[in-house]
Image (spheres, rainbow, N blue to C red):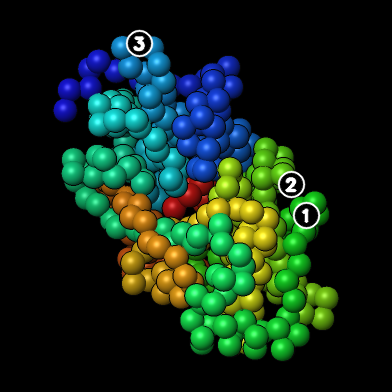
Amino acid sequence: MDAKSHTVTIAAEQDLERWQQFALERQPQNPMLDAGWYKVLADAFSVERLFLVCRNTAGQVVGLAPLYCSRSPFTGTHITNLEDGWYAEDEKASHALLNAARSLGKERNARYVLLRHAEAIAGAADRVVPTVRRIIDTSKPAAAILTEVKKKNRWAIRQAANKGFVVEQDLALERMEVFYALYARHMRDLGTPVMSMRYMLALKRQFGAARLKLFFVCRDGREIGGMLCISAMNTWLNMYAVVRKDLMAEYPNYLLYWRAIECAADGGIARFDLGRSRPASNTYVFKAKWPGADHDAPHCYFGAPTGRLDRIHERESLMQRIWKHVPLLVANWAGPKIRDQLPFS
C-alpha cells in the first residue's frame, strides 16, 4: 500500500485543540480518542507520548493514533496505542500511521509495536490476538432491555437486591479513593500489579464529573464493589468494574452492571460498551450474558513480543500466582512502580 502521499506528525500540546476538534467531528462516540488522555499519561505515568496525526496531500487531518512508548523492563521497550485509540479515514491513512509507528519503534529500538483495534492493518501484522467488545443498545427503554436479559440473570439481579445490595451513583466523584481501594485489592487478587492512585486522580482532573460515571454497589452502607465509566457522545465505556470476590456468590456484580446499564438507558445514552475481553475468557463469558453484539477489536503485533506481560492474559504465570499472595500494602506500594511504564496491559 502506497501511503507516501500522506504525512504523519507527532502532536505537541499546542496541537491538542485541533486534535480534539477532529476527534469530536469524526469519532464523537469514542472516548479513547479524547485529547485529555495526552495529559492523563503525563500526569500519571513515565511513558513517552507519541500522539500521531495523519494528513493527506491537501493538509487535511485524516487519521489519529494516540501512541506511547514504554521502556518497561518487564516487556522490553515497545510502542502501543490506547485501547480503541485508532482512527483512519481510509486504507492509505491506516498504512501511513502504521509506517510512522513502525519507524518510531525502529528509532527507539523497540522490541515490538502493538496497535489495538486497528482492523485495517491486521493483515500486515506478525501476530494478531483477537479481542472483542460487547456493546449494548441502550437507545431502547430500560424495561425493554431487561426483557432481553436471560431469565437466570434477571433472577440473579433480584437475588442481589433481596439480599440487601443497592447501587449508588457518585455524581461528584467524591469517593474516587474508595473505588481505588476496591480496585487495588481486586488487581492484587488477580495477580496483576495495580496502577497508581495518581492515575485515578488524573482521570478525575482531566475528564471530571461530566465525563466520568462512578457507581458503587453497597450493603449496610458499605461499598463492596464499583464501576467507573467514561462517557462520550451517546456512549458510555465501562473502564473498570470490581466486586469483592468473597461476596460474588450473592450476585452483587449482576446488580451493579444492570443499574449502570439502566442508568445509561434512562439518560438517553445510545450505546453501553462493556469493554474488551478475550474470547472464551471468564470476563467474556460474563459480558456475553448481557444482551448486545460483539465487535472485533484485534490486537495487532508488529515484531516479536517476548516479555512476560505481553502474554499475561493467555495463561496464569508463576509471578501472577505469587503476586496474589503478596500483602496488600506491599502490592499497593510496588504495583504503581511496576506499572509506571505500563499504563494499559
Can residue 59 be seen here? The reply is yes
Is 13 in front, or is 136?
136
Query: Which callout, 1 or 3, points at the residue further toward the start of the chain?
Result: 3
Confirm whether residue 335 shows in the render: no
Name the amino acid type tagged 2.
Ala
Query: Total marks drawn?
Result: 3
Question: Which quadrant of the view contains residue 157?
Answer: bottom right
Q: Residues within 10 Å of mark 2 (few under 14, many from 20)?
A: some
Query: In what element is the residue under mark 2?
Result: helix
Is 161 situated above or below 115?
below
Residue positioned 51% across, 29% down in the render: 25
Query: Mark 1 and 3 residues: CB-CB less than 8 Å, in contact?
Result: no
Q: Earlier in the sequence, mark 2 or mark 3?
A: 3
Tag in front: 2 or 3: 3
User: Label 2, on which residue?
Assistant: 209
Measuring 56% from the left and 62% from the top, which residue is drawn there?
Answer: 140
- Tell me the quarter of the image containing the N terminus: top left
Residue drawn at 50 percent across, 26 percent down: 22
When asked about the image quadrant of residue 52, the answer is top left
Q: Marks 1 and 3, Cα distance to the nearest angstrom?
A: 44 Å
Classify residue 194 as left or right of residue 344.
Answer: right
The numbered dot on residue 58 is 3
Q: Are marks 1 and 2 in contact (CB under 8 Å)?
A: yes
Depth check, front residue: 59 or 269: 269
Relative horizontal placement of residue 314, taking residue 40 as reference (left or right)? left
> Percent from the top left, x then y, of residue 299?
32, 50
